[in-house]
Image (cartoon, helix red, strand yellow):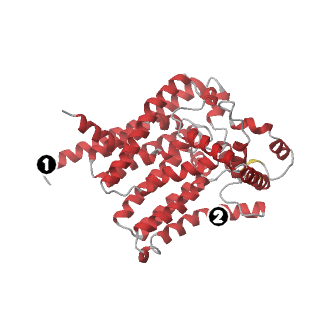
Amino acid sequence: MRPGAISTRSSQRAKLGAILALAFLSRLGYDGYLYFHHFAKDPSAAARYAGPDGYWALSLGVLKRGEYAFAPGRPETGREPLYPMVLAAVESIFGTSYWPGLFLNALFGALTSWLLYLLALRQTANTSVALLAALLAALDPEWVFWSGMLYRETFLTFLLALWLLLDARAQMAPTPALYAGMGAAFGALALCRSPFIPLGAAYVLLAASRLPPAAWQRTLGTFVLTATLFQIPWVIRNERITGHFVPGASIGGFHVYAPLRIDYSKPEMPVGTELNDPLVQSLNKSGLSPEQKDRIYYAAAWKIIRRRPLLFLDTFRIKAAKLWRPYPHPEWRLNYPHSFRAIEFLGLLSNLPLWLLGLAGLWLMKRQGRDILLPAAVLAVMTVIYGVFWGAARFHAPLVAALIVPAALAALRLKEASAP
């Protein structure tokens, strides 16, 4: 190998190392800012940043009582277990404070930057695109922000980036080992957030079109088998607890029903407002299990959809639009330790250009004959799924992993086109 080639490779590694360090330190620095300037002064703020969805509380239940439950003797079936279990594993070593989870988020952020660098190299064979993709992932303001809260978003982004990379590798060498790896990555993704499960079904149908039927058994069959094995223990456990098959988590029915009952003529209505609904109030007092309530919510939602299909379509439109709004929901302003207006501006400044560049990049990749099946499926299928269930604005954060590499490609092409 020529000395110049060695020098170039060394320079690229140095740049990548600096970007990954930046990804890790920017998140850890933000976490430290939150802790020392806000958590230490205001314990209630720390409780909010631990996440109202309760993943940290579930991890403590595993560690202190040996049960996956918010309250003793009441097993939880409404929150998928992987992220709380990961938190519990780390806290069992480093202690049950917020810091192990925040440190883990910083680590997953850096690993996501690295995975997207490798994905860009695989898809474009261009080191400039790869380094820019890693830099975009390292400094994305929304990703940095979510690293400071014990939500699933950072972990989900890492898993999705891993799945995208394994799929890109499998396109070059469709071996059973790679499809088993894809199945494991997707199985973990679905065990972390069950609305991703339909994405796996859509992927199998679409991927079958690019593979010869003779290869389906050892490729897609391996993917489905491995992904299913990840789900089986959770499904069996929930069936033993409830006596019924619980697909993913027992809160889906509420999230289909509740949006149909919100008065959207009142702007920015939070999800808790529909607690005034008579059905919600009666079920909250009923003493029924979450799984029993969920079945009732599904049945009630289906009655509304059959009677008023246009209402369902309009609600779907509103939720899908909310999913991709490029700035935070105003009800979150209490959770921000800094100017909400600054966050809104930062969202518009970063999210909107990134998304537009990402869509342009997917179009460029398609024109170049590159397979964009999986990133396109991620964006389209998950928008539909969240439009049916609950399109919270933060849910788009992991999906942006499908846009980072195309955005980097489009940005460099735009720079080249504008050069004199």
Q: Nearer the viewer, residue 242 or 37?
A: 242
Q: Residue at x 70, y 60 (%)?
A: 246
Q: Secondary structure at mark 1?
A: helix
Q: On the image, which quarter does residue 44 sit in?
A: top right
Residue 180 lies, in percent from the top left, at 47, 66
Counting from the top left corner in percent of width and height, residue 122 is at 32, 55
Which label sits on residue 377? none
Locate the C terminus by quadrant: top left
Residue at figure coordinates x 38%, y 40% from the top left: 357
Q: Is residue 50 left or right of residue 18?
A: right
- Exactly how many numbered labels are in the figure? 2
Could you tell me the amino acid type at mark 2? Pro
Name which residue type carries label 1.
Answer: Pro
- Residue 283 lies left or right of residue 58; in this view the side is right
Q: Position of residue 394 (x, y in %)?
A: 56, 39
Which residue occupies the foreground of this view, 337 or 397?
397
Residue beneath label 2, please?
233
Q: Which residue is mark 1?
A: 3
Q: Does residue 344 lie above or below 321 as drawn?
A: above
Q: Are marks 1 and 2 in contact (CB under 8 Å)?
A: no
- Please tell me which residue is depicted at 61% across the width and 34% down the height of the picture: 49
Above or below, 218 against 82 in this view is below
Quarter holding the N terminus is: bottom left
Q: Is residue 285 left or right of residue 89?
A: right
